[in-house]
């Protein structure tokens, strides 16, 4: 799977990301998330309440589970099978995060 960073804390800065705040933010955008079995830091995107990145209300994300939100202590991003799809989706979420900041 390809990994695309949404946001990363620069190496010269201190601190870590708060997992719960990131999850609340993504859910606040309308996304439904399911924990990935066997991974302590990953969630499947399952559906959304509005149109974003070609995904419509209530529909599954591209059939079977495809996009994962991965949260590490100093960065978080999207993991998926398609390079362009992951890059594009990460870019959409990055834009939303910057608007909310």
Image (cartoon, rainbow, N blue to C red):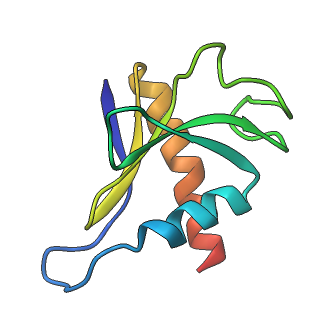
Q: Quadrant of residue 3?
A: top left
State whether residue 13 is above or below residue 86. Answer: below
Count all numbered tags in the image, as a single digit: 0
Give the residue at x 31% y 23%.
Answer: 1
Position of 78 with respect to 34 (left or right) is: left
Determine the residue located farthest toward the top in the rendered image: 63
Residue drawn at x 32%, y 34% as measured from the top left: 38
Residue 88, horizontal then vertical, whole percent: 52, 37
Q: For the view shown, which residue lies furthest in the bottom direction? A: 14
Please state if 21 lies on the left or on the right of 51 as rendered. left
On the image, the x and y values in percent for residue 46 come to: 66, 32
- Work out whether residue 93 or residue 66 is closer to the camera in this orientation and state it: 66
The residue depicted at 39 percent of the width and 25 percent of the height is 83
Residue 15 locus on image (x, y percent): 25, 83
- Using the image, determine if residue 80 lies above or below residue 78: above
Q: Is residue 51 left or right of residue 88?
A: right
Residue lying at 36% horizontally and 42% vertically, measured from the top left: 4
Q: Residue 84 appears at what percent x and percent y?
A: 45, 26
Nearer to the camera, 52 or 36? 36
């Amino acid at each position: 799977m390809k990994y695309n960073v949404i946001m990363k804390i620069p190496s010269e800065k201190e601190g870590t990301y708060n997992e719960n705040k990131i999850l609340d933010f993504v859910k606040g955008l309308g996304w439904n998330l399911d924990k990935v079995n066997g991974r302590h830091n990953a969630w499947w995107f399952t559906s959304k309440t509005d149109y974003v990145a070609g995904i419509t209300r209530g529909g599954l994300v591209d059939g079977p589970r495809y996009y994962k939100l991965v949260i590490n202590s100093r960065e978080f991003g999207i993991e998926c099978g398609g390079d362009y799809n992951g890059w594009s989706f990460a870019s959409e979420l990055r834009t939303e995060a910057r608007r909310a900041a």
